[in-house]
Image (spheres, rainbow, N blue to C red):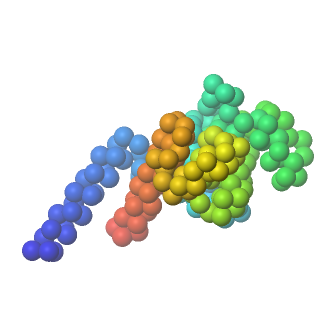
Amino acid sequence: MKRIIGYTLLALTICLLFNLEKKIGLFDKNPYETYVIKYSKRFIVDSLLVKAVMKKESNLNPNAVSNRGAVGLMQIMPKTALEIANQLNITGYSDKSLKETEINIMFGTYYLRKLLNYYNNNLILALAAYNAGIGNVESWYKKNPEISYKICKIPFKETRYYVLSIIFTYKIYQGVEKLKNFLKI
């Protein structure tokens, strides 16, 4: 009986994943895979996390520009990009460079690693800072340290949903990877 329930749950999970796949392209090969892997390895960030951030930030649109001026796949602010270019000793950097796919993924992945380091690999705080800035996160944390483990305590609704969305997508990507490995897809 337990085996039947287990197989039923597996079948339902697969059906759910294939329905999600139709909506968000879980099994589609990311067209930026080469750069994601390259910079995920270089900066030691899980490539699935980078993909989840890219999915949320730009929906994989390399030409995306937010109403606040964030640019590209990983939605980097030009001021932040200039700081990153200096930290990585990128010569000849200009704001136009940020629209280049490889530069954008490199900078976004580097910045994600920097935030993860800053917050001792606390994913909630790092993602909140990616969205709302370190200053906001520091202020929130001083008022309520629970934000480091309770997403619902993040005071900005946009940031709260942003963090939830990325973690949800990240967990789905992890599950899909496990399923692909299991099924040898």
User: In the rendered view of the protein, which quadrant contains the C terminus?
Assistant: bottom left
Do we see residue 169 in this rendering? no
Residues 106 and 163: in front is: 163
Q: Residue at x 83, y 45 (%)?
A: 83
Report the side of 15 relative to 170 (left or right): left
Q: Residue at x 62, y 63 (%)?
A: 121
Coordinates of residue 127 in the picture (x, y in percent): 59, 49
Residues 125 and 13: in front is: 125
Q: Quadrant of residue 62?
A: top right
User: In the rendered view of the protein, which quadrant contains the N terminus?
Assistant: bottom left
Residues 137 and 97: in front is: 137
Q: Residue at x 54, y 52 (%)?
A: 147
Do we see residue 139 in this rendering? yes
Coordinates of residue 27 in the picture (x, y in percent): 41, 52
In the current view of this chain or complex, which residue is farthest to the left?
1
In the current view of this chain or complex, which residue is farthest to the top?
67
